[in-house]
Amino acid sequence: MKYAIVYSSKTGNTKCLAEKIQSVLGSQDCIYFGEPSARALEADRIYVGFWTDKGNCDSQIAEFLKSVSNQQVFLFGTAGFGGTPSYFESILNRVRDYLPNEAKLVGTFMCQGKMPMSVRARYEKMMESPEHAPNLPMMIENFDRALSHPDQEDLAALEQAVKK
């Protein structure tokens, strides 16, 4: 079966997952690896990776997913926030909605991903205000927790999901 890996990666997290998928599957049957392209639509199975933008996939991936026809699709992504299965599932549910009915979803995977340091700097600046959001300390804690992701445990879980 010919496959393609299509991804969008703002910080390198999703690219890391895409590279892991290719290393697990081998490159001999991979007909395309990279940013969204019509060339990927020639594959039997497409692994589609995204970074999370406001609880959804980025617009580049959303548009690509709409162009899928009868291929098998495996969705994978990273999110700076969350870390809970229910949060990841809510994102995946929104992303699934971009797939046409004739596409067959064959698997999914999500994990936390590190965010740019500029995000933490913005949070720290916001903390200086006496009227800052009450959840801001939790957001800083989440930012720090995300710094190591995707980690080896995430990559091992991705490998298992791809091999199913």
Image (spheres, rainbow, N blue to C red):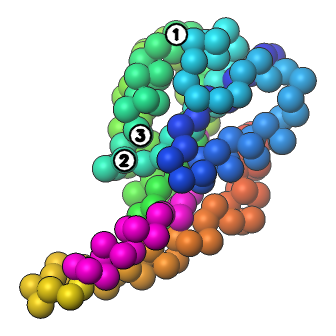
Query: Which amino acid does the dot numbered 1 rest on?
Result: Ser
- Residue 66: image quadrant is top left
Residue under the point 30% across and 76% down = 123
Side of 129 relative to 138 (left or right): left
Q: Nearer the viewer, residue 96 or 116?
A: 116
- For marks 3 and 1 on the same chain, the one whose residue lies earlier in the sequence: 3
Q: Quadrant of the N terminus?
A: top right
Report if residue 123 lies within the magenta region.
yes
Residue that numbered label 2 is attached to:
53
Q: Is residue 23 visible?
A: yes
Q: Are marks 1 and 2 in contact (CB under 8 Å)?
A: no
Tell me where the magenta segment starts and ends, as one range: 108-126
Q: Is residue 140 above or below residue 9?
A: below
| Residue, disc 3 | 57
Q: Are marks 3 and 1 in contact (CB under 8 Å)?
A: no
Q: Is residue 141 above or below residue 50?
A: below
Please indicate whether residue 11 sits to the left or right of residue 95 in the image: right
Q: Residues within 10 Å of mark 1 (few under 14, many from 20)?
A: some
Q: Which mark is residue 69?
A: 1
The residues tagged by marks 3 and 1 sit, at their Cα atoms, a distance apart of 19 Å
Residue located at (54% from left, 60% from top): 113
Q: Outermost residue toward the left?
A: 131
Q: Which is closer to the viewer, label 3 or label 1? A: 3
Residue 95 location, x and y as percent? 41, 35
Residue sitting at x 40%, y 38%: 58
Under tag 1, what secondary structure?
loop
Q: Are marks 2 and 3 in contact (CB under 8 Å)?
A: yes
